[in-house]
Amino acid sequence: MTDTQQTSGNSGRLRRLPLVAIALVAIVGAFTLRDWLSFETLAENRERLLDFRDANYAATVAGFIALYAAVVAFSLPGATLATLTGGFLFSTFPGALFNVTAATIGAAAIFLAARWGWGERLSQRMDASEGMVKRIKAGIDETQWEMLFLIRLVPAVPFFVANLVPAFVGVSLWRFVVTTFLGIIPGAVVYTSVGAGLGEVFAQGETPDLGIIFEPQILLPILGLCALAALPIVLKAVRGRKGL
């Protein structure tokens, strides 16, 4: 093995370290934090959290955003609970703004780790390839904005998947951040509003109804946004076929 090959191999391993670290933390967190990041824990500590927020509002906001971003960046269990906590502590607004900001920061962190580790090389190989792979990559490039908004709006797409896939197809950080921030607003507002009512729910000894996002009055508008995001993709596909 030449010095150049060895250097290239070491560089590749170093590039993958952040993503490997994220994966290891995610695995450990899945087993160690699941019971701790729960509604029961939030209910037991709600008075202390509210007292701390009232005495240290700015520190609470900064700490909340940092913790929420870490949960997303390391794919830890508790992202939904964090969103609800944002509503519980800060009401629907500015709670929704804090939630969206934190989730976007965390998503950008894992996106950059994935792109630095594998995404850049994979994207370059797809650009340099021929045949079907190259056509798929070209199609993705032509509809990046629409595709990015769509995977954020569709409730069925796991959040961590929507963070990784764009990194592997050469999406720019700017497009990723903009579409993430705007695309998660509808769902974030719904769950933040649920969190804003947690005080009453805890007082009654109940748990919040997280299935609310699938209620027709909530789901249909979100699906309408999905259709709007998908429409340009469909139109481009139809025009492409007519041009053949």
Image (cartoon, rainbow, N blue to C red):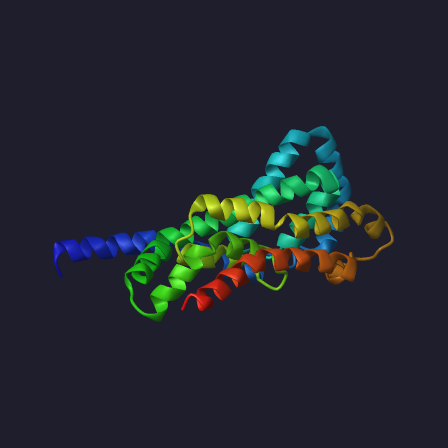
Identity of the residue drawn at 35% across and 67% down: 133
Q: Nearer the viewer, residue 96 or 229?
A: 229
Residue 136 point in image, percent of width and height: 40, 65
Residue 46 point in image, percent of width and height: 76, 44
Examine the image and state in which quarter residue 66 appears: top right
Identity of the residue drawn at 72% across and 39% down: 93
| Picture layout, residue 116 above or below residue 92 | below
Please identify the quadrant where the N terminus is shown: bottom left
Residue 210 point in image, percent of width and height: 74, 59
Q: Nearer the viewer, residue 1 or 173?
A: 173
Identity of the residue drawn at 28% across and 61% down: 128
Q: In this view, does 196 lie to the left or right of 25?
A: right
Please identify the quadrant where the C terminus is shown: bottom left
Q: Which residue lies furthest to the left in this view?
A: 2
- Residue 86 visible from this viewpoint: yes
Number of labelled discs? 0
Q: Nearer the viewer, residue 146 or 76?
A: 146
Residue 75 point in image, percent of width and height: 53, 56
Q: Is residue 66 left or right of residue 58?
A: left
Q: Residue furthest right?
A: 204
Q: In this view, does 93 lie to the left or right of 181?
A: right
Q: Is residue 91 left or right of residue 16?
A: right
